[in-house]
Amino acid sequence: MDDKIKALSAPIGTTLDRCIDLNQDEFPYATGDLSRLLRDIGLAAKILGREINRAGLAGIGGMAGSENIQGEDQKMLDVVGHIRFVRALKMGGQVCCIVSEEQEELVLTGNEDAKYVIAMDPLDGSSNIEVNVPIGTVFGIYRRKTEVGTSPTVAEDALQPGHEQVAAGYVLFGSSTMLVYTTGYGVNGFTYDPTLGEFYLSHPKMRFPEEGNIYSINESHYFKYAEAIQQYLNHCKQEGYTARYIGSFVSDFHRSLIKGGIYLYPATPGVYPEGKLRLLYECNPLAFIAEQAGGMAYGGGQRIMDIVPKDMHQRVPLVIGSERMVKEAMGFLD
């Protein structure tokens, strides 16, 4: 066969939908609902990615003129991301309620026969939109605790510890759009091909490299951090580790996953005394991915996914990344 024909007819890879279908037997209790839910997330990610890519032209990169529950100024794309994902999940019919960073109350979808609950940050790192830095979406999926057919509740359905997650993932909007997720059987990454409108498996069975040397932390708070954190940062410098900090949690985590490294956002007295990141829709999902990729995630001296949440928007300190580097950091913190 002619080499040009071979090149033009080469396999294009495994799509997200096909990968989900092939792995559906991993869920003994599944009836296809979780697969459809992951597809709904993929669709919403495509739509939001389009809005992000044309934000400058459409004039939607600025402020929305409102605040979220944490008192943070909302960007217009924060609001757009929330609307896009809530709409897709409501219409998909697989989710009974949503915990979103952008809304104080539990979002009821009206799908009381649905089996799943999702906690999400629709657009993480939105302060970086104007400077064209990668931003992302984070999500964690749980099975509902209340009886199917009834109205979901915050206490039973929303406030579940991270180890109850059945799936988690993130979408990274950067030089390419990637969707990375786990269902408890390893981590797979998919890259979006805009010419075909499909996510293709590009990073199968993702694992943290055993040896990493990148640390990521907001060092502007150095003198506010506890002495143990300062000692660890001094250790990183003495060891010649590379400092990298984007200020977008998804982006910083993704770099650590690809290249090997550690991300820290400790408690910061006078700024974020309980930590900055939210347990339900930022820390738990990425902790699940980290552990499935051979990494670790700790907060407040304990495994992140063992923390029982008390509030939908609860903040916790976080240390997450390559196993060796997290253990090294915890040696200082303990």
Image: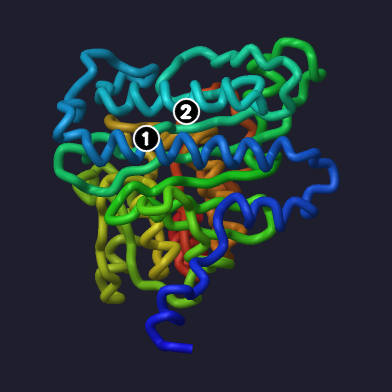
In the rendered image, residue 268, in percent from the top left (x then y), is placed at 33, 38
Q: In this orientation, which residue lies closer to the viewer: 219 or 40?
A: 40
Q: In this orientation, which residue lies closer to the viewer: 51 or 286?
A: 51
Residues marked 1 and 2 touching at CB (< 8 Å): yes
Mark 1 surroundings: few (<14), some (14-19) or many (≥20) residues within 10 A: many
Residue type of the residue flagged with mark 2: Phe
Residue 331 shows in this picture: no
Q: Disc count in the image? A: 2
Q: Is residue 27 left or right of residue 103?
A: right
Q: Is residue 65 above or below residue 259?
A: above
Residue type of the residue flagged with mark 1: Leu
In the rendered image, residue 120, in percent from the top left (x then y), is placed at 50, 32
Mark 1 residue element: helix
Mark 2 residue element: helix
Q: Is residue 144 above or below residue 186?
A: above
In the rendered image, residue 90, in percent from the top left (x then y), is placed at 57, 21
Q: Is residue 191 left or right of residue 230?
A: right
Residue 239's disc number: none
**Residue drawn where x is 54% and y is 33% of the image:** 280
Q: Which residue is mark 2?
A: 85
What is the CA distance from the residue labelled 1 to the residue labelled 2?
8 Å
* Residue 112 placement: quadrant: top right
Q: Name which of mark 1 and mark 2 comes first in the sequence.
A: 1
For the rendered model, the colour scheme is: rainbow
Q: Is residue 9 above or below residue 93?
A: below
Mark 2 surroundings: few (<14), some (14-19) or many (≥20) residues within 10 A: many
Q: Which residue is mark 1?
A: 48
**Residue drawn where x is 37% and y is 35% of the image:** 48
Q: In this orientation, which residue lies closer to the viewer: 126 or 176?
A: 176
